[in-house]
């Protein structure tokens, strides 16, 4: 029997409850795009998570090898690989959480929206299968452009009659991970203690870190806050340029994706006060989808939390991001309903 003990890693950092995996319920996690740059390390990290009892690794090709490799790790979950569309249903059946890092990544000079033409179709077909084979699963959408792929997923589920807004999440955890790292470096505080909410969306100026709410507090100048904000917004591009044509963030994304999936698992298992930022259906602003802090529970989203007090700089950032975010959301909705 597993004896591992997990401490929760939430943005709020408020709960200190411990959870013993020996008593953890059975949970199946499916990773779609599991043979890719994110998919492989994410599959590894999910294999290390004692809250997972079954791990289904799906891709169009290459998953038998990834699954064989990961399956030799002596942790709780049973691993199975599924390759090709004819095996997608099997991969999804019984899944509690479906994580989607399937699709093409950026190259230097591209925006995330430049990925729309290829990734929108991939996401649409994967979500059609989710609606059929595991309509109650929590969906963690990583594929870009997240600002459009989440609305696409929502429309697909609505058409299939399975949409539950509490169960669909755009994964924006990497923005939080970056904001924490950059803030800790500038504020010279212990990075392990840092919390920073990041709201809005997941592309350029739609990424709005709220450094005024960062803890531990630090006396940073307006110029320093501006530089931190810009670096967080451009974090993905920084990696794309450094990789010089060999893709975008994979390892830090796998880490971020694993944190978010772990939070979803804890919520499903009834661990209280699990809070992470995520791009979800929202009433926080006039936009239909928006990233903010979300309390996770047994049904997925338990509560979408508000923005709290914003500085004038953050208020300006919020107003500036709305037109771009709305246009990306509408593009996704239009695509899903036209095709
Ligand atoms: P990658 O090319 O290395 O891997 C993508 C994988 O998806 C490949 O293995 C490919 O075979 C697979 N795939 C393609 N079509 C598929 C389908 N129909 N069904 C299942 N699998 C399919 O790319 P990557 O670096 O892993 O990035 C994947 C996606 O994640 C990109 O869209 C990227 O922009 C996005 N991303 C998002 C974030 C975020 O913060 N949300 C961060 C980094 C990357
Ligand atoms: C990221 O933020 O790293 C991802 O969205 C990938 C990208 O294209 O920047």
Image (cartoon, rainbow, N blue to C red):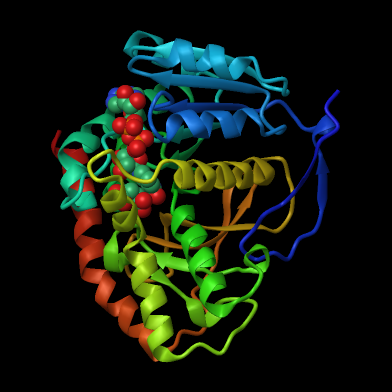
Vertical order, 318 against 145 (above or below): below
Count of marks, rendered view: 0
Residue 113 location (% of width, % of height): 19, 50
| Residue found 55% across the figure and 25% down from its top | 95
Residue 203 location (% of width, % of height): 29, 59
Vertical order, 52 against 310 (above or below): above
| Residue found 33% across the figure and 13% down from its top | 85
Residue 101 location (% of width, % of height): 39, 35
* Res 285 quadrant in image: bottom left
Answer left or right for 25 relative to 313.
right
Vertical order, 236 against 246 (above or below): below
Ligand 1 location (quadrant)? top left
- On the rendered image, what quadrant is the C terminus found in? top left
- On the rendered image, what quadrant is the N terminus found in? top right
Residue in front for this viewpoint, 43 or 139: 43
Answer left or right for 312 relative to 19.
left
| Residue found 58% across the figure and 22% down from its top | 55
| Residue 95 is at least partly visible in this image | yes
| Residue 137 is at least partly visible in this image | no
| Residue found 29% across the figure and 79% down from its top | 319
């Amino acid at each position: 029997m597993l004896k591992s003990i997990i401490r929760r890693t939430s943005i709020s950092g408020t709960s200190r409850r411990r959870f013993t995996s020996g008593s953890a319920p059975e949970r199946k996690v499916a990773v779609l795009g599991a043979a890719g740059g994110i998919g492989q390390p994410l599959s590894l990290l999910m294999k290390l998570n004692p809250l997972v009892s079954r791990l289904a690794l799906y891709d169009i090709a290459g998953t038998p090898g990834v699954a064989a490799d990961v399956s030799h790790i002596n942790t709780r979950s049973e691993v199975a690989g599924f390759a090709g569309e004819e095996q997608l249903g099997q991969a999804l059946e019984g899944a509690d959480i479906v994580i989607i890092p399937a699709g093409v990544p950026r190259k230097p000079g591209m925006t995330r929206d430049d990925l729309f033409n290829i990734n929108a179709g991939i996401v649409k077909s994967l979500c059609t299968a989710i609606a059929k084979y595991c309509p109650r699963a929590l969906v963690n959408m990583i594929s870009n452009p997240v600002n459009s792929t989440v609305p696409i997923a929502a429309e697909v589920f609505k058409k299939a009659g399975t949409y539950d807004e509490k169960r669909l999440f755009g994964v924006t955890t990497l923005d939080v991970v970056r904001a924490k790292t950059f803030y800790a470096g500038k504020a010279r505080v212990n990075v392990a203690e840092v919390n920073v909410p990041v709201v809005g969306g997941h592309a350029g100026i739609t990424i709005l870190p709220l450094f005024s709410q960062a803890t531990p507090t630090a006396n940073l100048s307006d110029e320093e806050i501006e530089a931190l904000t810009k670096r967080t917004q451009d974090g993905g591009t920084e990696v794309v340029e450094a990789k010089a044509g060999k893709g975008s963030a994979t390892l830090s994304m796998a880490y971020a994706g694993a944190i978010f999936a772990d939070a979803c698992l804890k919520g499903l298992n009834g661990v209280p006060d699990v809070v992470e930022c995520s791009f979800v259906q929202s009433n926080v602003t006039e936009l239909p989808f928006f990233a903010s802090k979300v309390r996770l529970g047994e049904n997925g989203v338990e509560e979408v939390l508000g923005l709290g007090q914003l500085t004038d700089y953050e208020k300006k950032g919020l107003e500036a991001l709305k037109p771009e975010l709305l246009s990306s959301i509408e593009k996704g909705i239009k695509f899903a309903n036209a095709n």
